[in-house]
Image: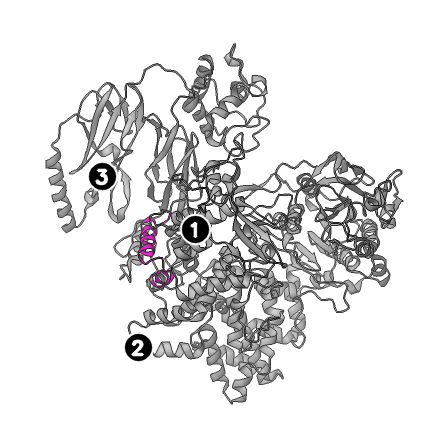
């Protein structure tokens, strides 16, 4: 047991020689075909920089070896270990545990075939007395047993009077609760074994949480020992500063395959603590992988899941992908159009999700029209594109679409959804000004960072300074007052991709953001105010001379603080929002560009690189971090031009993939999350209505708008058209995505409703014109196909339609009625109502 | 022949033409249904169930009070018929909240959860839809006459949104989009449906997309509903005897309540009847009187009708609104928003008749005894309907309870 390296002998190695050998080996491997175990290309030890508090303390670790496709596997038990200085630590190589033997520092060197790696381990001169501390020891018991989880005593209301901070973030409060609250009824220091905090989890007396431990368990002994030693808080004890989980990303092949995870805490005194058995694990999708209390994850089904480890008020995450077999030699190797494709392919190959083929020209032209300008292409536009023989015709089409005025109109509606340009809170009067303001910026492709700075620092009359309408959703309608607590989560979600709503009331359970962060961000808006009048619906936003945000607990003014950053100093009359706007939009801001590119990406792919697309946190890792980083860097380098981003995405082969599944064995969820095919989506309400109007040649009549106005150009209507509401026109009064799911009302309205009926029946519609011009049935049918689907009808479709028209006429209906029924059918078809 | 085919297609899903047998015994809580009568804008507690005849005239108003069927309890003079049937329902006089904005207050009372900035809680009807699902091929959640955005499915998603019935108090009443448009014959509709299936088939198969399958399912449901004799019959208020229609009152709320009864009878889980204009910031008494008169005709008739059909034991009826109104009549003769105190009524499904819970101060401004929160009220509703309101849904990646921290009002429960 005292042998330093168990199951392997100590041997000094010459670092330089090894490096050289490694380099040679890499060259060799690059030339030779990989065979068997020699596929390993690199090894590493995690975690690094282990600092054991004292002799006798241990830390679990992993040796990971890189294999083909960039995946890693646990090779700990297959490695040879050596130590730079013997006698400092002992290494258990089978299970991967390092234990301090003597104060000092040593390097663990590891070797696998001809690959090597090393890491530093320090053993501090901590006292060896075996005192049990409230934090981390007792808190860890509360965590692993689930006592302080949100479903139990960690809920904001506690459970039966006993309330703990969520996963132990507030050590002092927890100690107070255990020791003193309710007349100290939970502990009996005179007779520790009689304490409620022992008898409840033992189920000696009834406990809503059931029996959680036995007298023989280590947890019981920890609690008892702590009570015997006086149940002290020792508030000067170390705090957790960061929790780390290894590996951060893992692919498991085949259901039932396992991976051991290691969790380590970094403490405020500079030491580390093995938390692998002291955290509470969870998996976001048990159908993909489950994780046991000892940190071993088991694959249960194909997909992606995030596993979380929570303890001592901190949280760490890893991403697990489960596949049933690795990509083989037949995995498609496709030419990339730009860096998006290279990075998307790499991830797809790692998870063996093959991309579909390229979209046809028909599919592409209809898709790109609907995604950029919210309209289907006309038959004429389709014919011109098909006839074009240029290799770069897709590139040219993308360029021309982004220049069309409908691009600005269509994307403005999305920004109106995001900025919540709505009726309820602004009484519908100056919203048109805001719409025009956004639209003008999109049309001119003004830099987005400038637009955001203008929004955050806006002040003045809502008509003269339209950007001020941005503040409306943060107004308390009844009190006619600005509410900073509403502005804070809006700004943070929109521009940083961070949801702060939870942190208003308590520390974020899934993130290391606290209530202090929330109020620190609020303080930038502390002096913003609104006055009403003189005329009805006139409002003016201005900065008051004074005003501070009060912390709800301390009741003291909170200094303005950048999220996760510093506390800037201000002159008394300085507009704090300017500093915030500059910080938000700085090229160095880690969130702004990522949040923005992810939002735009989500519009095109129906899945963000981070999903949900406005929920960035360390516990919600990106499905493709490299791509997110590159896109963000690209956006910054472009000078924050949204059109540059659109152009890059639209030109990628990934965007131009077919929507048709690779095959029946494909996993639709993985295909969506890894962008292996274009995701079929419903047309937004405005695009569907505008397309119906365009195909039928009958503009939709909107009350109080000139004839021919498109749905996408409406100012937020006081009473939106029934069609728009039924198809998901959003209310915009809460932060919420536009609904994208089909409903019964939609189907009923398409089948029986007057929107489609009136346009199909209008005597002077497109159909009426063609009949008047003497077009044949075939020509009319072909034209409707091109206008609606951007493709010619197949011969079997032509036959079906022909038979239909003949049979209708045989049943005594007019040619016009029969062709009208066909037009009705096309508008009701799924192919028309979706983008694919 | 084709017409019959069309009808048969639908009836397969609904199992026949008849309304469910009447006069069934008391069912389990999990089989209960609910009718919500919603007073749009918020009715005055003083002019409904909590009059203060001894208060100064600018508080008590001019409607006076009438004795109810329970000795010692008085209602507003506007509700003589309702007062007489108090033995059939219970009243809570001490409801209170702090939401004074219509939209937020409505979301609150319809869900039992204080509205949040980032999440819209599902209303009672949406939760019933989700927990119980459709019955006899009818939509589980119906609103009369129109959709109110506070009473929809919120984060549960639009598939649980209500079905809109339209206004049954019109001569030409027909449910929106339920019947084929005039000029389109059954034969034509059938032919279109056939062609649609042909055009859709290839596309749906090739794309292999869950979205397309779901859209196709909704189309199938829509066709079933259009062809369903059960649905047509449920919405056919014209088949009610004139005498009964008159008894309910030929008013929006009267015919709305009657339609609600027909729908519940046919298998709808929850029907909401919206009534009013109660948002009377000026000319309160002039505007309120006709509304209350209509309500006073409809509500007791509904209870009696349900009772006679043996449905009252299984149907919860609640009368709620945005909030109460200010005790003091303002200088425009109006009453403004007042969430601090409001009065609601509950009947049927085991609710004890003749019970009055809670008490307000001399001007009906604040509860002074047994205050009841919106959460408590919602917990009561769900408890009666047999829905576990502690259940957690998942929204925005966090668990959200149907009702948090609500305790059912035991006094009204049998």
**Disc 2: which residue:** A389
Nearest to viewer (mark 2 / mark 3):
2
* Colour style of the rendered protein structure: one colour
As measured in the structure, the alpha-carbon distance from the residue carrying label 3 to the one carrying label 1 is 38 Å
At numbered mark 3, what does the secondary structure look like: helix, strand or loop?
A: strand
Residue A162 visible, this orientation: yes
Q: Which of A628 and B117 lies nearest the eye of the viewer?
A: B117
**Disc 3: which residue:** A43
At numbered mark 1, what does the secondary structure look like: helix, strand or loop?
A: helix
> Label for residue A436?
none
Give the percent coordinates (x, y) of residue B271: 70, 53
As measured in the structure, the alpha-carbon distance from the residue carrying label 2 to the one carrying label 3 is 51 Å
**Disc 1: which residue:** A495
Magenta portion: prevailing SS class = helix
Nearest to viewer (mark 2 / mark 1):
1
Q: What residue span does the magenta drawing correspond to?
A: A622-647
């Amino acid at each position: 047991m005292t042998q330093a390296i168990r199951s392997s002998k100590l041997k000094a190695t010459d670092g330089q020689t090894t490096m050289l050998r490694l380099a040679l080996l890499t060259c060799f491997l690059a030339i030779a075909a990989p065979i068997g175990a020699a596929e390993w290309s690199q090894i590493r030890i995690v975690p690094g920089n282990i600092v054991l508090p004292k002799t006798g303390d241990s830390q679990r670790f992993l040796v990971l070896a890189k294999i083909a496709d960039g995946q890693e596997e646990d090779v700990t038990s297959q490695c040879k270990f050596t130590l730079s200085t013997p006698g400092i630590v002992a290494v258990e190589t089978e299970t991967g545990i390092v234990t301090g033997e003597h104060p000092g520092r040593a390097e663990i060197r590891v070797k696998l075939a001809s690959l090597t790696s090393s890491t530093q381990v320090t053993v501090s001169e901590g006292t060896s007395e075996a005192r049990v501390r409230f934090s981390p020891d007792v808190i860890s018991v509360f965590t692993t047993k689930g006592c302080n989880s949100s479903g139990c005593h960690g809920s904001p209301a506690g459970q039966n009077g006993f309330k703990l901070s969520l996963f132990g973030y507030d050590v002092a409060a927890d100690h107070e609760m255990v020791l003193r609250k309710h007349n100290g009824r939970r502990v009996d220091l005179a007779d520790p074994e009689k304490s409620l905090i022992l008898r409840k989890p033992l189920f000696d007396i009834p406990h809503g949480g059931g029996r959680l431990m036995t007298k023989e368990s280590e947890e019981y002994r920890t609690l008892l020992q702590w009570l015997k030693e006086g149940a002290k808080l020792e508030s000067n004890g170390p705090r957790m500063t960061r929790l780390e989980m290894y590996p951060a990303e893992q692919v498991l092949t085949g259901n039932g395959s396992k991976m051991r995870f290691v969790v380590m805490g970094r403490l405020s005194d500079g030491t580390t603590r093995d938390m692998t058995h002291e955290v509470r694990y969870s998996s976001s999708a048990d159908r993909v992988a489950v994780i046991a209390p000892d940190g071993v994850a088991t694959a249960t089904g194909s997909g992606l899941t995030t596993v979380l480890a929570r303890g001592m008020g901190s949280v760490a995450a890893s991403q697990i992908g489960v596949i049933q077999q690795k990509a083989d030699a037949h995995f498609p190797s496709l030419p990339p159009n730009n860096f998006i494709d290279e990075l998307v392919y790499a991830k797809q190959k790692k998870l063996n999700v093959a991309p579909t083929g390229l979209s046809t020209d028909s599919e592409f032209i209809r898709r790109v029209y609907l995604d950029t300008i919210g309209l289907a292409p006309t038959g004429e536009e389709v014919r011109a594109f098909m006839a074009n023989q240029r290799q770069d015709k897709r590139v040219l089409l993308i360029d021309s679409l982004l220049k069309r005025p409908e691009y600005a109109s269509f994307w403005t509606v999305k920004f109106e959804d995001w900025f919540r340009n709505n009726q309820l809170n602004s009484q519908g009067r100056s919203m048109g000004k805001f719409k025009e303001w956004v639209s003008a910026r999109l049309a001119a492709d003004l830099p987005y960072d400038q637009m955001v700075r203008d929004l955050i620092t806006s002040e003045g009359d809502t008509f003269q300074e339209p950007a001020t309408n941005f503040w409306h959703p943060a107004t308390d309608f009844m009190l006619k007052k600005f509410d900073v607590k509403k502005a804070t989560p809006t700004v943070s979600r929109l521009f940083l991709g961070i949801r702060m709503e939870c942190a208003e009331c308590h520390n974020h359970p899934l993130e290391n953001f606290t209530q202090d962060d929330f109020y620190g961000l609020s303080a930038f808006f502390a002096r913003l105010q609104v006055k009403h009048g003189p005329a009805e619906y006139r409002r003016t936003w201005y900065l008051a001379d004074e005003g501070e945000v009060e912390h709800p607990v301390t009741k003291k003014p909170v200094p303005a603080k950048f999220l996760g950053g510093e506390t800037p100093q201000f002159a008394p009359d300085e507009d704090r929002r300017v500093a915030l706007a500059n910080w938000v939009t700085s090229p160095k801001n880690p969130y702004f560009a990522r949040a923005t590119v992810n939002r735009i990406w989500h519009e095109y792919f129906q899945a963000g690189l981070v999903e949900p697309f406005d929920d960035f946190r360390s516990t919600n890792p990106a499905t493709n971090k490299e791509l997110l980083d590159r896109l963000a860097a690209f956006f910054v380098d472009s000078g924050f031009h949204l059109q540059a981003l659109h152009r890059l995405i639209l030109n990628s082969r990934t965007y131009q993939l077919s929507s048709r599944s690779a095959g029946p064995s494909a996993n639709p969820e993985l295909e969506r999350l890894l962008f292996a095919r274009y995701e079929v989506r419903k047309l937004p309400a405005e695009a569907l209505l505008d397309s119906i109007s365009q195909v039928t040649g009958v503009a939709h009549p909107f009350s109080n708008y000139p004839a021919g106005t498109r749905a996408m150009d409406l100012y937020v209507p006081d009473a939106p058209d029934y069609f728009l509401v039924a198809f998901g026109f959003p209310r915009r009064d809460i932060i919420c995505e536009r609904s994208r799911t089909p409903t019964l009302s939609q189907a009923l309205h398409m089948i029986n409703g007057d929107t489609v009926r009136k346009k199909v029946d209008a005597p002077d519609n497109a159909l009426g014109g063609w009949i008047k011009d003497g077009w044949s049935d075939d020509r009319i049918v072909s034209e409707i196909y091109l206008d609606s689907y951007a493709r010619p009808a197949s011969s079997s479709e032509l036959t079906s339609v022909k038979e239909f028209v003949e049979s209708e006429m045989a049943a005594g209906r007019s040619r016009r009625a029969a062709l009208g029924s066909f037009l009705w059918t096309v508008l009701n078809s799924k192919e028309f109502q979706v983008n694919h | 022949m084709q017409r019959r085919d069309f009808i048969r297609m639908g009836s397969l899903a609904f199992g026949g033409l008849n309304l469910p047998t009447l006069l069934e015994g008391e069912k389990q809580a999990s089989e209960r249904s609910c009718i919500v009568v919603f007073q749009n804008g918020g009715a005055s507690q003083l002019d409904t169930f909590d009059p203060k005849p001894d208060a100064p005239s600018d508080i008590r108003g001019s409607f006076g009070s009438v004795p109810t069927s329970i000795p010692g309890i008085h209602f507003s003079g506007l509700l003589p018929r309702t007062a007489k049937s108090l033995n059939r329902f219970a009243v809570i006089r001490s409801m209170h909240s702090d939401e004074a904005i219509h939209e937020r207050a409505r979301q609150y009372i319809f869900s039992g959860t204080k509205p949040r900035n980032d999440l819209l809680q599902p209303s009672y009807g949406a939760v019933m839809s989700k927990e119980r699902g459709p019955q006899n091929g009818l939509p589980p959640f119906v609103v009369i006459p129109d959709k109110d955005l506070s009473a929809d499915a919120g984060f549960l998603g639009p598939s649980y949104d209500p079905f809109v019935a339209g206004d049954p108090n019109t001569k030409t009443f027909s449910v929106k989009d339920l019947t084929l448009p005039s000029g389109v014959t059954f034969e034509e509709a059938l032919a279109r449906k056939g062609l649609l299936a042909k055009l859709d088939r290839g596309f749906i198969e090739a794309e292999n997309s869950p979205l397309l399958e779901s859209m196709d399912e909704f189309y199938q449901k829509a066709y079933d509903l259009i062809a369903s004799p059960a649905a047509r019959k449920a919405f056919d208020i014209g088949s009610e005897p004139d005498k009964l229609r008159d008894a309910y009152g030929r008013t929006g709320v009267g015919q709305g309540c009657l339609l609600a009864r027909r729908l519940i009878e046919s298998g709808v889980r929850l029907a909401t009847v919206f009534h009013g204009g109660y948002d009377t910031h000026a000319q309160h008494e002039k505007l309120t009187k006709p509304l209350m008169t209509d309500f006073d005709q409809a509500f007791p008739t509904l209870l009696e009708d349900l009772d006679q059909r043996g449905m009252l034991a299984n149907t919860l009826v609640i009368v709620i609104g945005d909030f109460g109104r200010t005790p003091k009549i303002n200088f425009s003769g109006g009453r403004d928003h007042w969430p601090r105190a409001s009065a609601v009524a509950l009947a049927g499904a085991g609710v004890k008749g003749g019970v009055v819970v809670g008490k307000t101060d001399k001007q009906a401004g604040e509860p002074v005894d047994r205050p009841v929160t919106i959460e408590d009220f919602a917990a009561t509703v769900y408890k009666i309907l047999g829905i576990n309101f502690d259940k957690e849904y998942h929204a925005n990646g966090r668990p959200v309870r149907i009702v948090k921290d609500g305790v059912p009002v035991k006094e009204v429960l049998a």
